[in-house]
Amino acid sequence: MDRLLNVTTVLSVLLLLMVLISVRRAHIRVEYSVSWLLTAVAMLLLSRSRPVLEVITRWSGVPDTPLTLFLISGTLFLIMFFRFSVIISHLRDDNVALAQRVAILEYHIHSLEHHEE
C-alpha cells in the first residue's frame, strides 16, 4: 500500500509540474489548467493522507483502500474529460457560426464589387 501511495505521489507531483510548465510556456490556457491543478493537488493530498483515504474507503463501502484511490482519481479524470468535451463542443459550434458569418461577409463584399462595376 505504501508503495502505491508513493507512486501516486510522484505521479501527482509530475502532473502538477507538467501543468505549471505548460501554463508558463503558454501551451495551455490558465482557465483550462485550473482543473488539472485541482486534480493533481487532490491526488497528492489523498496519497499523502492515508487516514483520510481509509475513512473514505469505509464510508464508501469499497473493499480496498487502493481501489478507493483509483476510483477517486478515475472519477476526477472522467469529470475533467466531460468538461473539456463540453468546451470543445462549444468551440466547434462557435467555429461553424464564425465560418458562416465570414462567408456572408465575403458574399456581400463580392456583391458590392460587382455592383460598382
Image (cartoon, grey):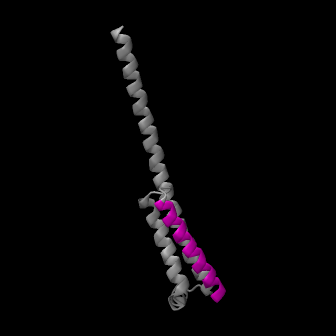
Using residue 113 as the reference point, say whether residue 60 is left or right of it. Answer: right
Using residue 70 as the reference point, say whether residue 82 is left or right of it. Answer: left
The answer to if 12 sits in the magenta stretch is: yes
Examine the rendering and report whether any part of residue 104 can be seen: yes
Examine the rendering and report whether any part of residue 1 can be seen: no
| Range drawn in magenta | 2-24
Q: Residue 47 at x, y = what percent?
A: 55, 83
The quadrant where residue 74 appears: bottom right
Q: Residue furthest top?
A: 117
Q: Residue 61 at x, y = what percent?
A: 56, 86
Seen at 53% across and 69% down, the residue is: 17
Seen at 41% across and 24% down, the residue is: 106
The answer to if 109 sits in the magenta stretch is: no
Determine the main secondary structure of the stretch shown in magenta: helix
Q: Residue 34 at x, y = what percent?
A: 44, 66
Residue 103 or residue 31, whichever sits in front: 31
* Looking at the image, residue 14 lies above or below residue 6: above
* Looking at the image, residue 54 lies above or below residue 15: below
